[in-house]
Structure formats: structure tokens, C-alpha cells
Amino acid sequence: MVCTSSLQPRLFSTFVGDRLTHSKLPLHQLFHNNSRGTDYVPLQLSKTYCSLTDLFFNKRNRNNLQNNKRKRLEPGKVSPRRPVPEHILRPPYVQSKQSPGIASGLEIHDENGKECMRASGRLAAQVLQYAGTLVKPGLKTDEIDEAVHQMIIDNGAYPSPLGYGGFPKSVCTSVNECICHGIPDSRALEDGDIINIDVTVYLNGYHGDTSATFFCGDVDDNARNLVQVTKECLDRAISICAPGVEYKKIGKAIHDHADKHKYGVVRQFVGHGVGKVFHADPVVLHYRNNDAGRMVLGQTFTIEPMLTMGSYNPVMWDDDWTVVTADGSLSAQFEHTLLITEDGAEIMTKC
């Protein structure tokens, strides 16, 4: 993404790679190479943050991490980009080949826009549900991409991630310690893995964006609890949404519930407005904050909390997309696209 001055310059959108948005630092200062050859993403601290917090999380989970025999993720082979039929409408960023940032200003939908958002959201949900049924030991994440890609184009839509700022695939598959933006490749899923599948479709000029974390085979209780609590965080955040509600209450609802269960909340990646534009205002923070702004009737945005079992400090791989936890601890995520209605919030990414 490109830098933008339309919003407070401090955070990344959910699709970041080396396409930076909302950072106070120049790009070369924000990402600095460490001894492992990966890029560390510096933590943007909230006012309530104390330096003891991350130490607390690490100490709390040290025994679990030491006793975990799971291998760290390693990059696999990425297959060639899959083609999209010429008759399918592409988002503007695909044609321009430019790296878009977060667009300024809220998009308020008329009735036609709402129906278009429902259609794109419903398709995204159906694709995600189908992708989840495929998850099993031995399945390659690239096979998930192939299935997702085919289902999306079969329904006359474009897979939004494909070509976004150079992203090479049609879906994100984030396994185990991968926080987000995992690139589907030749790695086969293993018994006991957890995997977040993040689907966005572009249908009739509107994006529908959703994700969920799935179990692969026999998953241990610690991982299952992390996934369950992450889903509960999303549900709690959705339940407080309505016209006039402050966005910061989303972060409080998520952070309070995560703290209760002693999980870390990733701060660098945020929810966002979505509609005709993939990423737009508002920026939705998933941790306690004092940001201004209130929800508006007729707007659409995502909430997508990412929780970790240990450190919530992210490290970026050399592919400029894959983001993993610094200590290798598990991470989980869930996401929905919401429409603010008179009665609260309508989940648009449901089957």
C-alpha cells in the first residue's frame, strides 16, 4: 500500500505487506531487518500499554511454548498466479497495478448499495464455508487457493486479494503462528494445525470480506480455546455496534474479553471500511484506545480481531506479506463485514 495522510498515521490496514499505510515512520525505519532475515514490525503502543504487559504474556505461556513440539512455519513453493476470465469485472487496483492505500471518507450505502453488499457478503461467506470443509491433514494450502479461486470466478466474481499490491494469490491462508496474510503454497496441513482462511470477493463492484479459523484434525485444547475466545471477541464487538456508538468501544469489548482469558491482542492490523473500495475509513482498532469517531447509519466495515497465545509482536517474512508471531505462539482470527442499521448491525457475510 501507499502512505496516506487522510487518517491518523499509525496503523496498517489488514492487507499490508510492504505496502505501508498509517505509519509515523518512513518505510525504511518501520521495517528493520533482524538477524533471522525477517522484518520486524515495531509495536505501536496504546496509552494503556505498559512494558510489563508483553513480559507477562510471554511468562504466562512460556511452559506451553517450550512443551510444544510443533515445527515453526517455513515458506513453501508458490505456484503461478491463476487466471481470471476477461469478462469478470476487476477492481480498479488490478487494472492500474498501483498499490492502493486506505481511502478517506465513509461510504454510506443507498438501498441498491446495501443489496450489492449483501450479495458480495453472502458469496464470500459461502466460499469461506466451502473452503473450511476442505481442511484436513495432507491438504496443501495452494489447493485451498485453487478451490477458492475457482468457486469465486464460477460465480462471476473476482478474488479481491489477487493482484492487490502484488499479492500473488486469491485467498490468505494463515496457519498456526501466522497472524495474517499467509500466502498459499506447497505446505501441506498437518494434524493439529489451526488455519485462518481469509476470503474477499469483488462482485458487481462491491467487496465482501470475511475470515474464520478452522481446526485441522486432532487439535489440542489450548488451541481450541484460543480459537473459541477469538470468535467470542468478534461476537461481543458486533453486539455493541449501532448508529452513534463510538468505534473505540469495539476495541474495549475485544481487549477486555481477551484479557479475561490472558490472550494477547495484535495491534498493528485493523478492521476497515469496505464497499466499492476494498479498504476505506473507518479504521477499526481491536484494542483499548481513545480514538474519536462514531458509527453512522448505512455504513459498512469489518471487525477482525487477531489474538495470540503468547507475544503479540509481529514479524514479517521476506515475502513482504506473511506475518507471524515473534515467539512462534499460535494466533487466531475471525472477521465479518457489517452494515450499521437502525437496530444495530447486520452481518453481511453470512450464508
Image (cartoon, helix red, strand yellow):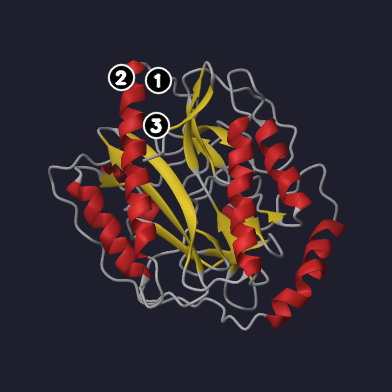
Q: Which residue is mark 1?
A: 109
Give the SS element for disc 1. loop
Determine crowd level at label 2: few under 14, some 14-19, many 20+ residues with C-alpha closer than 10 A. few
Residue 48 falls left or right of residue 206 = right
Q: Which residue is mark 3?
A: 275
Image position, residue 31 (x, y; %) = 60, 60
Residue 64 falls left or right of residue 175 = right
Q: Is residue 18 above or below residue 239?
A: below
Residue at 58% across, 68% down:
177
Determine crowd level at label 1: few under 14, some 14-19, many 20+ residues with C-alpha closer than 10 A. some
Image position, residue 40 (x, y; %) = 63, 64
Q: Are marks 1 and 3 in contact (CB under 8 Å)?
A: yes
Q: Is residue 265 above or below residue 282?
A: below
Is residue 132 at least partly visible in the picture?
yes
Q: Between marks 1 and 3, how big is the CA–CA gap?
A: 9 Å
Q: Between marks 2 and 3, how big is the CA–CA gap?
A: 12 Å
Residue type, mark 3 in image: Gly
Q: Which residue is mark 2?
A: 112
Residue 323 falls left or right of residue 209 = right
Give the SS element for disc 3. loop
User: Could you tell which of marks 1 and 3 lies nearer the N-terminus?
Assistant: 1
Residue type, mark 1 in image: His
